[in-house]
Amino acid sequence: MPPKFTAAIQAFKADKIPVFERGEEEYERSVATPNLLYRFARPDFVLQPETEKHVVAIIQQARRLKLQLTIKCGGHSYAGHSTAFEGTLINDREDGYVINGGRCPFVGVGGFILGGGLGPFSRSIGMGSDTVQEISIVTADGELVTVKDTDDRQSPKGRLFWALCGAGGGNFGVVVEMKLAVKQLLAPGGVIVAGRYQWFAGKDEPDLFEQDDFMSTMHDFYTTDWPERMTIDSTWICDLRLPSGNGVRFLTYFDGDKEDFDATIDKYIKHTTLVTQLKRRSLPEKTTRFLHETLVAQWSEETVKAFPTNKSYSIYSSFVFSNDRSTIESVTELIRKKAAAFRKAFPGERVEFLATFIHAGGKMTMYHMYLTLEWEDKWMERDMRAFLRDAKEDLRPLSLNGMAAFRMYWGDNQDELRRIKKKWDKDNFFQSDQGVRLPGSKDGGKGDKDQGDNGKGDKGKGDKGKDKGKDEGKDTLDQGDDEDLTDSLAGKQWEVYETKDIVADLQELADLGF
């Protein structure tokens, strides 16, 4: 270990900051990841601050010793990025009231709020960043600063607060505390409706994607002007590990009672089977139970994938589509063709192709869509990257402004964000792959990759940042998913990988089938 790391560990321990080193159980838990693309990513040590003073001390020592910090919250990032030291779970027993949080149960509060935050009820109560009232952040100078929604918008603190409400994490400092407004739902008696239904073809029926009325049903579904109280996410599933063929998973959230929910489904969906099943599979329940149990169950597959015991590889690309009929018909037809091509190209392989439509809508008549490819054998990486590259090239022209979803967040406010970056982090101490850059820095390369956000559409500007929805020019630099990047992440990590227990490492490889 380099002397500066040894000195840093001693200094942090002297400040009574928990330090986890390689070989220790807590270290292994801290760096565990379900995505094997990052299996060799092992920092020299891990810090777990317990107080604001700890965070201040860490930043001060890191600057003094010229250490590079990576900030981690829930660890939800698809691309191995992180956003804050600690995630927070708020569990209140007041039915009918919610803290605006993400759909996916393992999304960290830091990444969710700092990225804007699309939640299950954002269509009716706004995005996560719309509910922020106060943020405490340790800046690059090691100063603890508190900014509020009441600060003058043109003041340094007011500008920082504005930037923190959606520009993403890892840009201006380490957030140690947030104060959020509690939102009251419209549902009477604190009872909402939520459900989950997976639509696959019957035993003697053609594959779902090939049925005559399937595409017309989905076209109507996506172009419907749904009431803001209704949110329905959907995922097109092409999993070659399943014998059931292609299908669609629907997740329903309704800020109202069951009678109104059923009436809404009857009004806007004409497919008899889909109407029946969505109503049967959606149940009324108290909001506290929904947050405690149902939300986790709805995203059960994603939750399991997030466990470190899930040894698989995954890459993805993001898009934002308007819901006009022409766009929706083109997008869904491409997804159907890609699913057929995926099955033809990889028969017998343990691979999966998903297209997830996150129902944004409300004041934003659009869908965030994520393409995800997952596989279990490392030798499939080149083929998976090539497939995603081709799919992205076909779909990107249909995305708003021809851009990836994450490029939509800043829009024509990029220059202002850069000026705020210069004010609060003039030395660019905090860096991330999709981070805000200093004025005069060139775009491209590491900072413009499309491989990561807080996932499942949980990122984007809220109403406070609604003027950030435009961008200059098209998206020319995207995620690094070309074939040339095959094994590049693991290869770079391997250059600095060390082990203190070779026997344990060999056993882990054996468990993986090597």
Image (spheres, rainbow, N blue to C red):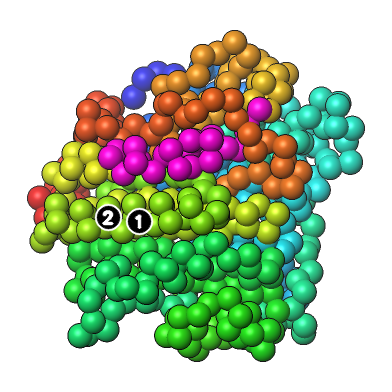
Q: Which residue is mark 2?
A: 337
Name the residue rendered at 86%, 26% in the picture.
155
Compared across the picture, whether 243 is left or right of 235 comes to left
* SS class, disc 1: helix
Q: Residue 34 in the image: x percent, y percent? A: 33, 53
Name the residue rendered at 33%, 64% in the picture.
237
441 magenta-colored: no
> Are dots 1 and 2 in contact, CB under 8 Å?
yes
Mark 1 is surrounded, within 10 Å at the Cα level, by few (under 14), some (14 to 19) or many (20 or more) other residues, namely some
Q: Quadrant of the N terminus?
A: top left
Q: Which residue is mark 1?
A: 333
Q: Is residue 2 above or below residue 241?
A: above
Q: Residue 55 in the image: x percent, y percent? A: 63, 35
Q: Nearer the viewer, residue 161 or 137?
A: 161
Q: Residue 426 in the image: x percent, y percent? A: 65, 15
- Which span is picked out in magenta? 389-412
Q: Residue 453 in the image: x percent, y percent? A: 49, 43
398 magenta-colored: yes
Compared across the picture, whether 92 is left or right of 237 comes to right
Q: Residue furthest top?
A: 440
- Hey, what amino acid is under mark 2? Lys
* SS class, disc 2: helix
Q: Nearer the viewer, residue 87 or 203?
A: 203
Alpha-carbon span between mark 1 and mark 2: 6 Å
Does any portion of residue 413 appear in the rendered image?
yes
Does any portion of residue 193 appear in the rendered image?
no
- Hey, what amino acid is under mark 1? Glu
Q: Is residue 211 above or below residue 103?
A: below
Name the residue rendered at 67%, 89% in the picture.
259
Q: Nearer the viewer, residue 186 or 32?
A: 186
Q: Nearer the viewer, residue 146 or 489?
A: 489
Q: Main secondary structure of the magenta part?
A: helix
